[in-house]
Every structure is written in C-alpha cells, then in structure tokens.
Image (tube, grey):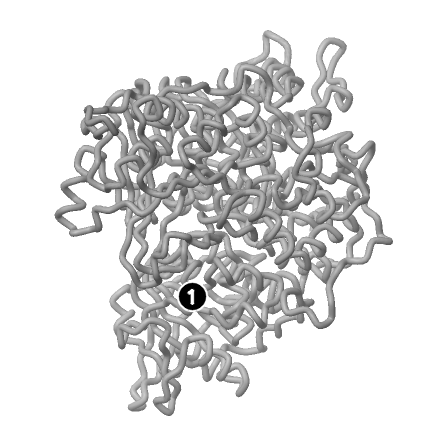
Amino acid sequence: MAPIELARRAGGAMAVCIRGERLPGPTAGLIAAKQSVLQRASRLSGSGAGAGVVTRALCASSARTFSSVQSLPSTYERLFNKYTDVRRVLGRQRLTLAEKILYSHLDTVEETLLTNTDNGRSVRGKANLRLNPDRVNMQDASAQMALLQFMSCNLGRPAIPASIHCDHLIVGHKGSDSDLTAGIEANKEVFDFLESAARRYGMDFWPPGAGIIHQTVLENYALPGLMMLGTDSHSPNAGGLCTVTIGVGGADAVEALVGAPWELKAPRILGVELTGKLNDWVAPKDVILRLAGELTVRGGTGSIIEYFGPGVDTLSCTGMATICNMGAEVGATTSIFPYTEASARYLQSTRRGQAVENVEGLQGFPSRGTSEDAKFRFKADEGAEYDRVIKINLSELEPHINGPFTPDLATPLSRFRDVVKDQQWPEKLSAGLIGSCTNSSYEDMTRVESLLEEAADAGLKPTADFYITPGSEQIRATLERDGTLETFEAAGGVLLSNACGPCIGQWKRQDGVAKGTPNVILSSYNRNFRGRNDGNPDTMNFLASPEIVTAMAFAGSTTFNPMTDVLKTPDGKDFRFSPPHGLEGPRTPFEPGIKSLGVLSQEPDADVPVAISPSSERLAFLEPFPAFPDADLSGLRVLVKVTGKCTTDTISAAGPWLKYKGHLPNISTNTLNTAVNAETGEVNAAYDLDGSRHTIPELGARWKARGQEWLVVAEHNYGEGSAREHAALQPRYLGARVVLTKSFARIHETNLKKQGVMPLTFADEADYDKIAAGDEVATVGLYEMLRNGGRGEVQLRVTKASGEEVLIPTRHAVSKDQAGFILAGSALNLLSKGI
C-alpha cells in the first residue's frame, strides 16, 4: 500500500495530503448545514441563487512556486512532476492524450513503464499500471456496499476526496415533486445511512433531487488532467472535459479511498478521428450511436477511446461528454476528448473561471525555450500512434436509432422505417423519454425547445407520452429561469426528478402497458437491455438523440422520419419540422437552484454514528468471505450453463431490487434471475443433481446451505453493462468460486477478482460444448498460479455424470495483486488489515 497521510479538510473544502503534498478539494464554502437530508430535500421552493459555485479544485491559493515567474496549483504541480518523470523514462516516445494523463498518475513511473514492456516500447496491453486517482465519486446504489466495505477498513477518513450522489433510488411516476417526496419517504433509511457516513468520514454528500452523478461531477468536479474513479459504468462522461475517469466496482473504489494504488492493465488506445461539422438534424449522440454500430458491445474492451481531429473543435463540451458517456456501451475502459475552447466556455459558465487560467498556466509551463515535449499539452503529441483509427466525417453523418435490446444495433434514420416493417416491430410509439445523465445538457434541451415551440405554433402536441429528466438541479433551475421548462410543460411533457428514473429501471408507467405486452419506447438514454427500463422484457427501447425522440413523439409512430415526413395540423395543413437549433450554454452562468438540494461538504466527525439498524432489511454489515484453500479447488459443480447475452442486469437486476443494494443476503435472491439456461432454453431455471427444478438463485441458496461450491458457464462479454459489483458479490455470497466464459467485460472481470471469484475463459471456445450443468469440476494449476502471483496456466478437470473426464484448458488475466486478493478471499480481506 502506498504511504499516505490521511485526508484533512480546511474551510469546508476537502484537502488531502499524499506524500506530503496538499490536494485541494472541489468545493469550498458550500452548504454545511446540520439539518437532515429529509429536512433539506423536502424544501422544494426558494431561490438558490445565493448558494453560488465557488472556489474549485485548482484554486490559485494553493499554488506552489516553481520559479520567480511562474507557479502552478498543487494538483497540476503533481501532474507536471509525474509527467516530467514519464518523459524522462520514455524519452521522445510520442504519447496520446490519454497516456499523458494516465501515466502521470502512476505510483512508480519508472518501475511500471519499464517492467515487461520492452524497455518502455510496448506499454499498452502489457504493463500493470498502479495508479493514484485524484478522487472517487459514488452513486447511492453502489455507494452503500462501497461504504460498508470502507467501514471495515477502520479508517477515520478517505485518503482522497470522495462524493456520494443520491440519484438511483427515485422512481419516475407522476412528476418531479411528488416523485421526490415519495422517494425520500421510501428510501429514508438508505439516505440517512449515506448522509451519516458522509458526515462521519468527511465525504461530499449530494442529497436526493440534487442530480445524477455524472452531470453533477461534470459541473463540479471534472477538471482537465484529473484522474477519477466512479462507481458507475458511465463515469467516463467526465472525459468530455478532458479527464481520465474510469467506471469501477465498490471494492476498487475502496482500494483508492484507503490510499492504495489502483491497478489497471495498460489500455490500448483506439483513436477516432473527427472531421467536418454536424448538420442540423445530427447531434453528438449520433457519433457514438454510429460508432457503437461499428465496434459492437465488445469492440472497445481493453481500450481507451480518444477523439481527435478538426471536427473536435466543432463540438460543445456537453456534446463531448455525451459521446464519452456511451463509450461504456462498447466496453471501453474510458473515453476522452482534448481540451478545447468549448471546454473553457463550459468551465466559465459553471463558475470555474480560475480553472481556465490554471489550464493555460499548465500548458504554458515551463518558460519558453524548453523543448515542446517538456510542456504538458491537453492533446496528443504530433505523431502519436493509435492501435486503431476510425474516421468519422461529421458532415456526412446522419441521425441514428439503436436497438432494440442492445445499444450496438445501429440503424440510420433514413433506413429505420424499412427496418421496422421488415422486422415487424410495433409501429406505435408508446413513449418518448429525453434527458438523463447522457442527454440533459442546456444544448440538448434548448434544441428540443425549438421543436416544441414550432409545433405549438402549429397547434400540435406529442401523441405519445413525453417525459423529461433533468440531469441536475443546476440544469433544471437554469432551464426554469430561461423559460425552457415552461415550453416543456405547455407541450404536455412530464417533468421527472433530477435522478436516474426510467433509465435505470425506476419507472412506474401510467399508460396501462402490462408486463409481457410488446411495445416501443424511444429514449435519449445510454442503455437499452431487455426489461431494463420498466421491468417488461417485451418493451423495446430504441436509443436516439433528444431531438429525434421528441419529433417522433409528436407522430407517435416508429416509422415517422422528421427530416422528410409531414404531420397534419388540427386545421388539416401539412406540417414539417424545421431543423432543431439551440444554445451551447446559457447566456449567463448556470443557476445553482434550490439551496436544500446543494452539496453537504464538511470535516469528518467521528462522533457521528453511522445509521444502520440491526433489524434492517436494506442494510447489513458485511461478513468476510472465506480465504482460498491451501490446494486446488475440487468438488465444484456447474450451477447453470448460460447462453446468450448475460449482462450485469441479468446477473443482478436493478429497478425494484435497488432497495436491497446494502443488504447482500436479500439482494442475492435475484442472482441470474433473467439468465437463459443453455440446455433447456428456460429463463431463470436450474436443476439440482436429483433433477428437481428451481430458480437459479434458489438453487444457489440451496447449494450454499449444504456447502456445495459452484461455478457458472457462459458465453461472450459476460457481465457487460453497469459497473455493478453486486453481480460479483451475489454469486460469491451464494458459493461461486469460478466463472468460466468465452470472454468477459472489463469491469465485471475485475469485480469478480476483487471478491475472490476466479474468472477463466476457454482457451478454445468450442470447449463450451464439453461442459454441462451438474458436471463436477476441479481446478488444475490454479492454486500454484495464484501462489506464483498470476504466473502459470490453469486447466479444469470436468467429470461427467457417466464418469467420463474431460480436461479443458483455460486462460486468465490475473495480476500479482489480484492473485493476492483471490487467495485472501477478497480484496477487502486484505484492505481491512491494512495490507
């Protein structure tokens, strides 16, 4: 574990000492009120103009002098010093932007970049990067388990700044005010726990109604050059503001919170060159929708997507964030854009003008006359090479609609009508939903406003239900101030709370569509797995830009093309939408909004008890998992063999199950409950050795009770989707020791290792057919490999019911640290002992 001096705070702003250097925090002078979250969040009226957004991370007061003429704030001083080490080690090697930021956060630069990398010439895909992130951000569903794990480490405060965002537990139903009130009442126990933990440990706390984590982070914490971890797969949203932000599970977050270096296999760099400029009906969302169609849900695995080229300068900062947000849908480690004039404008509009000056200072440091490589530029070096380059001409791009049931099934708008008819998808559109963390920017909403105003002038209103989700209280308040919300309400739109809502499955529909009824919705969200939004596996969610969703909601039809088709006005005239238009940002800085929805930022207070009731059905302290035995595993049984897409939604469903995120025994009763049994074709069905039929979680619990450890067999990209560590925790709790697949999604594979479950892939994918449910399995070489720090091969000896034995060779990607986690039983078992 890296040497640390634990965090301290001054003046309400988080300040952390790492190796004797002070890291200023994101907020200062903000709300430090003592009233409870329920009291504060229930005050849904009153101006928040006085709250302000004040001094941020890179404040001038923290500047450290480098020479008599120039100085840098400490965050950039540390970045620059590490970058200088990187240049010393790698010489004149050309670096991409992502590499500059990532390598400049290494714990030990020389050791990491020169170990098993051909003297630094082959870092990507080979080096195990041990990184020191600048901060951790956690949403409420994942924060519960992360905090329970952090509490087990017996520290008084986190080693780096951290924030908690209450955004996942509010159900979208009747409208923002009533939904927020109902959500606070239903989840009081969890919100009290999160707030009390924030107060005790000195973490920033954003109450329910404050906004969605990714939008709030972009507005308040994201700064060019930072490296952040977020306990949500869409955390790379902050890459739109030139950060390296990576989605992780709770155990990864805890590793950073206790001050230990966080490990990542050095990603490959996938370059996307943008040229041209978007046409009127085309939005930044269409860039990533089109890219997803090319890369598929696995194409970005093990890579950072870095955007470059002249087209970058034509995009807004929030548009770049939208694109980075959905990089998760192609499996990318993260995504990043260079710092542009639009980035500076966004920082100014969010009242962070000092950060603009600090960026300019860093890029101009050191003084003239030094080599160009010595300067830190927020762009790739001239001549930097990418592992692959995809070119997209924005001028030739057209709107896309992706789905159903997967975000990579991309169809250009011009072809969508024909595809709908050919596939016999429903032509009636049930609902249009815009906003969320992906597309609720001022630019998005004012472009939609232009369509609504034009339609209103023609006497038209949406014929499909129309929902709007602001990404934050700041966005909502600014749209209210500037009259945009009034336009939405006049069109009959339902304004939902500043929360995830339907995007994460928190949606109580009012249109009478029963579960099992095929229907279509269009959304500007980022993910559309089967059953994700409303629990109905027959709801087809198609992803599109907010403009396309809105225009099609007026027609109420999936075959309507707003670029070419006409609607009939009440007086029988033909109406065709003009291309949407809007503003990149507000003409005056963003409005902070209601004071009671602001951040609670305070010193740690050890006298604050963390609120957990011994009889709680929603929160439970964690019991340590047993360590790995002193020998290879034997006597394992295959619980179920899964076929098809198996996402983290499949392994650990969200929606109504979110209420049990802090109670491992209770939430484990949904484990793999929408998985498809490869041998029978049944959903959520597994068979015991005596032939009796059970649900998958029932059989897992049954085997747990009799001490029968087990494994799951699955196909490609197992665990794609959310950064949901419960998808690793739940199987582990029920007795899983191994997961054997054709391939894994990055975050889930890491989460399994952190919880002591061994992820293995078939060396030969055809061997998937050689193993079946109920087979007995023993590992060969696994214990030796773990003892050797990840070096060595692993095989599985499979014994069939007939007595026949089959030896299946496998592959793994276990590092030295990860081998230690698995041997210990989990990462937490080590971290809690200070190892």
Neighbourhood count class around disc 1 (C-alpha, 10 Å): few under 14, some 14–19, many 20 upward:
some
Looking at the picture, tell me which residue is in the foreground, 370 or 362. Answer: 362
Q: Is residue 682 left or right of residue 237?
A: left
List x then y, in percent, for residue 361: 64, 15
Q: For residue 659, which quarter of the picture? A: bottom right
Q: For residue 159, which quarter of the picture? A: top right
Classify the position of the C terminus by image quarter.
Answer: bottom right
List x then y, in percent, for residue 735: 52, 76
The answer to whether residue 709 is above or below residue 183 is: below
- Which residue is painted at 49% across and 84% down in the image? 702
Looking at the picture, tell me which residue is in the foreground, 363 or 596. Answer: 596
- Which residue is painted at 30% across and 52% down in the image? 540
Q: Is residue 581 left or right of residue 517?
A: right
List x then y, in percent, for residue 388: 32, 35
Looking at the picture, tell me which residue is in the foreground, 741 or 372. Answer: 741
- Which residue is painted at 49% across and 28% down in the image? 486
- Dot 1: what SS? loop
Residue 89 in sight in this render: no
Q: For residue 580, which quarter of the picture? A: top left
- Which residue is painted at 33% across and 62% down in the image? 742
Looking at the picture, tell me which residue is in the foreground, 500 or 392. Answer: 500
Dot 1 amino acid type: Glu
List x then y, in percent, for residue 570: 25, 29
Which residue of the protein is positioned furthest toward the front in this rendering? 571
Q: Which residue is mark 1?
A: 793
